[in-house]
Image: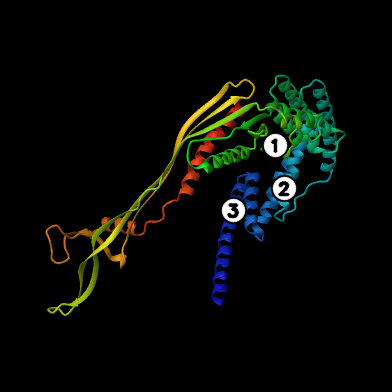
Amino acid sequence: MKKTITIFAVLLSLVIVFGSCASKRYTKKGLKYEALGQYSDAADMFYQALLIKRTNIEAMAGLKRTGQMTLSKKLSEFNKAYNDQKNKEAVYYYQDAKDYYNKIASVGVELNFPSFYDEYYDEVKNVYVEDKYYEGVKFLDDEKFADAEKAFREVVKFQPSYKDAKDKLVIAVNEPKYRNGLKLMDQQQFRKAYYVFDEIIRNASNYKNSHELKAECLEKGTIVIQISKIQNVSTDAQIASNLESKIIENILEANNPFIRLIDSGNKTTTGKGFSNQPVSTNTQNRHPDVILNVEISKFVYNKGDLKETEKRGYLKKQYKVTNRETGEEEVKIQYEKVKYKEFYMYRSVELSFSYKLINGKTNVILKTGSKSYSAVDEVNYARYQGDSKNLVPGYWKTTVHSSSEDYINDNPESIKALQKLLNAKSQIKDYETLSEEVVNKTATEISEAVIDYVVKN
């Protein structure tokens, strides 16, 4: 505990020392700028020095001098704009001067900001706000909504409660969007219009009848899609059920408000749409606009067999002996002939499918597709019932005597390859896992085709 406190104290002292040095460097730079008459730059340096070390007396005095000069220049610009009746410039010059005064005050340096400037500012601000308000009203009357928005934003920025500026700003922002939404509805582009009214509602809540129009767009823009029973030629009936569930899940996750799913019995699969809006009765009971037919034309499971191969190698042993001539210990290596086993297994699932999107009223084929997906897994590993860390690959013909065919691969690459096999996984993916993979790939292909059709139509 005592050691921890000591380390903390050392680190703290280093921080203080380095901080003090940095503060001094900024102070020296500030003095150089001040000597050159660059008072604004000098003030910035003194300000940085005080951010690091508030007790830097020299930096504080320097900021008092140069900061006041900088502030006085800003106030002079405000005063000139005020006298020239340049109201906008005056308002912004004052804001800049006030922000600068508050910034310097935040590091403990109080500058002189004469109070009569506040009175001048209130006077010119009131004139500026009034002018901007009536300018905005004129733009609004002329239906120049973008210009009106800029004007009312200025009014609200400087005087939020001025007359009905906030209400007029809402009109300036949302009226052009509202009109665009109506235009899109006239063009039968209900989905685009839906999102326009949705944006208006998020920005302005109850602007005119946007809620009613949004609901109308949802109803008229919705495509009712019937998912027919999947035709399945495989012996696994569960595959079709799993595929249908996954297709539905993917489509729902897309959260497209204009897709309404029903099964072959006309039962609604999705009860609610975007933003949890209730589905209208008209949409729920409507004849399907599109019918999705899916067929699994091939489903093959290759279980695979575990192949076991006996391998011959060597167990590397090291031992120490004493050299009779030198009397020193030497390390000797001995290779013992041993057997170990290597295993290999391959397993796969393949699914072939086709789909059709059919017009529910005319039976015209709208979109088709077919594809095959496979999921595979394999294991290749070795096992040895002994000291596997010292197992060395190679070959030997017989344990009784040496042969010209015997060899030992005691090199880094061969050892690394064998150790990789010894540490490799032995568990291969089961049927459920592989079949789920191909079902997921197939469902993604089909659900994306459905969503793409809705988006483009």
Amino acid type of the residue that numbered disc 3 sits on in the rendered structure: Tyr
Where in the figure is residue 306, as x and y percent of width and height? 35, 53
What residue type is disc 1 on?
Gly
Kindly identify which residue carries mark 1: 273
Q: Nearer the viewer, residue 379 or 352?
A: 352
Q: Residues within 10 Å of mark 2 (few under 14, many from 20)?
A: many
Which quadrant, please, contains the C terminus? top right
Q: Is residue 413 left or right of residue 226?
A: left
Q: Residues within 10 Å of mark 1 (few under 14, many from 20)?
A: some
Whole-angstrom CA distance, mark 1 to mark 2, is 62 Å
- On residue 68, the disc is 2
Determine if residue 87 is in view. Answer: no
Element type where label 3 sits in the image = helix
Q: Residue at x 59, y 53 (%)?
A: 26
Q: Is residue 31 above or below residue 137?
A: below
Which numbered circle lies on residue 26?
3
Considering only order in the chain, which callout, 1 or 3, is on the residue closer to the N terminus? Answer: 3
Q: Is residue 356 visible?
A: yes
